[in-house]
Amino acid sequence: MKFGVIGYGYWGPNIVRNLMNLDGVEVRAIAEISPAARIRAQKAYPGLTVTSSAEEVLTSPEIDVVAVISPVWTHYELAKAALENGKHVFVEKPFTSKSCQGQELIELAERKNLKIMVDHTFLFTGAVRKIKQLLDEGALGNLYYYDSTRVNLGLFQHDCNVLWDLAPHDLSIMDYLIKADPEAIVATGQGHLNGHEDVAYMTLYFPEKVIAHINVNWLSPVKVRTTLIGGEKRMVVWNDLEADEKVKIYDKGVNISTREGLYELLVSYRSGDMWSPQLEQAEALRHELAYFVECISNGQQPFNNGQAGLRVVKMLEAASESLKKRGALIEL
């Protein structure tokens, strides 16, 4: 399967490296507008076609799949051109900058019988796969909340705010783990340096009293990647910066019973063991790209397809609307 990659900036080199190491995959060309990045690509892969023209990759009859690894505002035009030229598309997150664009790309791919995959890399990490397994098996019981902190100093983006940059990670994970769409969203934030919000908070209300909260920040003195997932039976702490025990499961919770004949709740706290399960160690991006190749070969729809990407974009749009209105509740 022959790939062309558009974009060799921050994430592009990781895409190319992983594609190069996959059996049955060949990278034919890289398109990049930055002369310095083109030099880097040519040094790393001397035998590869490296061009400044995305058009060359999009129209090449030798390419089956195009990976769009460029700023979000370019995704729609590039992905649309790739689909119109009969190529499957792998798109960096977020899928598009508007939900109407995402819907159009999905419909175009369906008409052309082509596949779209949105790069929600975290869904392929050992941590998220293990948490998904625990939820599916009922080990956590009914879900109560999802609470994530994803903060660091930079990297400042010039074409989007911190929500559009960092929140897609958590929104895609939530979409994968929580078997329901959010009913309403609230977002607050503030911009201090470049006109875009660099600190933001987002709350999502799901059916069955499930609540989710995301804290994203480009102005934190420390890097934090911690997620708490609370269930009726057990609770999970996922610290993605931990070298070994990334996921810890706590057999802790609250039991509530009603004393018969009295309007009084009896609350007892349950405190049991903590354990850290063994996680799959393979690189998530490699696993994701291999899965996409498999989906194309077998004609199956990836679970992180255009529809999954579109759901994330709709949540981001609602959050943007709420931000403008200083935390107004936006119904979905």
Image (cartoon, rainbow, N blue to C red):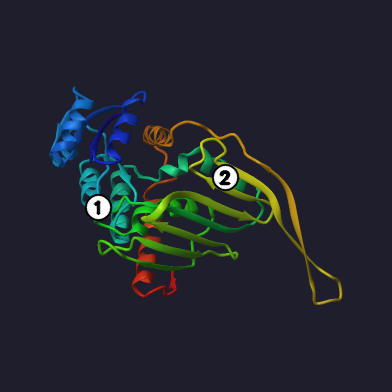
In the rendering, at what x and y percent does residue 1 appear? 30, 28
Q: Is residue 172 left or right of residue 2?
A: right
Q: Residue furthest front?
A: 221
In the rendering, at what x and y percent does residue 149 appear? 47, 55
Q: Nearer the viewer, mark 1 or mark 2?
A: 2
Considering the numbered disc 2 on the image, is that residue within a helix, a strand or a loop? helix
Q: Residue furthest right?
A: 261
Q: Residues within 10 Å of mark 2 (few under 14, many from 20)?
A: some
In the rendering, at what x and y percent does residue 190 appear? 35, 67
- Give the residue type that dot 2 points to: Ile
Q: Residue at x 39, y 65 (%)?
A: 319
Q: Residue at x 74, y 52 (%)?
A: 271
In the image, 168 versus 29, the foreground residue is 168
Q: Residue at x 47, y 48 (%)?
A: 225
Q: Quadrant of residue 24?
A: top left
The tag on residue 55 is: none
Q: If you read the primary sequence from the N terminus, does the residue marked by circle 1 or circle 2 appear first? A: 1
Q: Is residue 257 left or right of residue 73?
A: right
Q: From what the image shows, is residue 128 above or below residue 48? A: below
The residue labelled by disc 2 is 131
In the image, 97 versus 99, the foreground residue is 97
In the rendering, at what x and y percent does residue 136 appear? 61, 46
- Give the residue type that dot 1 points to: Tyr
- The answer to whether residue 56 is visible is no
Q: Quadrant of residue 42?
A: top left
The residue labelled by disc 1 is 76
